[in-house]
Amino acid sequence: MPAPALLAQLAARYAEPHRHYHALQHLDACLRHLDTMRTLAQRPDEVALALWFHDAIYDIGAADNEARSADWARAELLALGAADEVAQRVHALVMVTRHDQPPRTPDQELLLDVDLAILGAPPALFDAYEQQVRLEYQAVPPAAFRSNRRRILQGFVDRPRIYHTAAFHDTREAQARANLQRSIQALGHEPPGSPQGE
């Protein structure tokens, strides 16, 4: 766990008012998932630190949130006297949450599965997550949001596996695919009263 002063800074970030999903509740859920799967990690303390930082910076519309969060994590670790290789591994763990490159280590696989655990949650929890994400992007026009969200969710569906570890794959893969397909279908429907071409 981060030192108290840093912990307060991180908690303040996760409590920012524009966050509805990527908030303290998501961080808490990730840390609880890691606790139950801790034996799968090669370096569980580094995975935990990466989870604390993985959404530390979350500016809506910014394309470099993960990079800025990863840089912050590395700088803090180096300032605390951590070895460069430790800081680099934590940096890489945070960066893998961009979900644009396959994981290269078992710890990266576990961190990604923990971050995406919500996709395989029971339908009511998944639907609440989708509503919270929409609230985070409420400034985005509905048509643009639906198009972008469909593209993102379809990207997960198109993967051979959503979850990398056997533990998450065996318990959440089928539900995740059902949730994603249902959400993609819902995003394909124009909500009542929406202006044409919006």
Image (cartoon, rainbow, N blue to C red):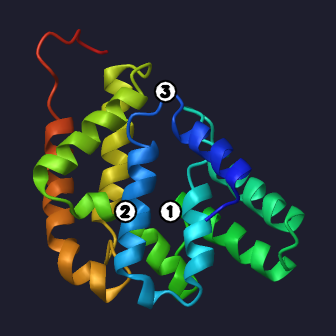
Q: Could you say where residue 67 lies in the image, as x and y percent from the top left?
A: 70, 54
Q: Is residue 26 left or right of residue 143?
A: right
Cα–Cα gap, marks 2 and 1: 10 Å
Query: Residue at coordinates 85% horizontally, 66% vertically from top-left?
Result: 80
- Residue 25: give x, y in percent of width and height: 38, 47
Question: Residue 81: x and y, percent?
Answer: 88, 72
Q: Residue at x 27, y 41 (%)?
A: 130
Q: Is residue 137 left or right of residue 130?
A: right
Residue that badge 2 annotates: 116
Rounded to the nearest angstrom, the CA distance separating label 3 from label 2 is 21 Å
Query: Picture quarter containing residue 189?
Result: top left
Marks 2/1 in contact by CB < 8 Å: the verdict is: yes
198 sits to left or right of 122: right
- Which residue occupies the foreground of this view, 94 or 17? 17
Disc 2 residue type (three-letter): Leu
Residue that badge 3 annotates: 18
Q: Quadrant of residue 173?
A: bottom left
Q: Nearer the viewer, residue 162 or 170?
A: 170
Is any part of residue 32 visible from this angle? yes
Q: Secondary structure at mark 3?
A: loop
**Residue beneath disc 1:** 99
Number of the label disc, if any, that sits on residue 161? none
Residue 77 image position (x, y, % from top left): 79, 66
Q: Earlier in the sequence, mark 3 or mark 2?
A: 3
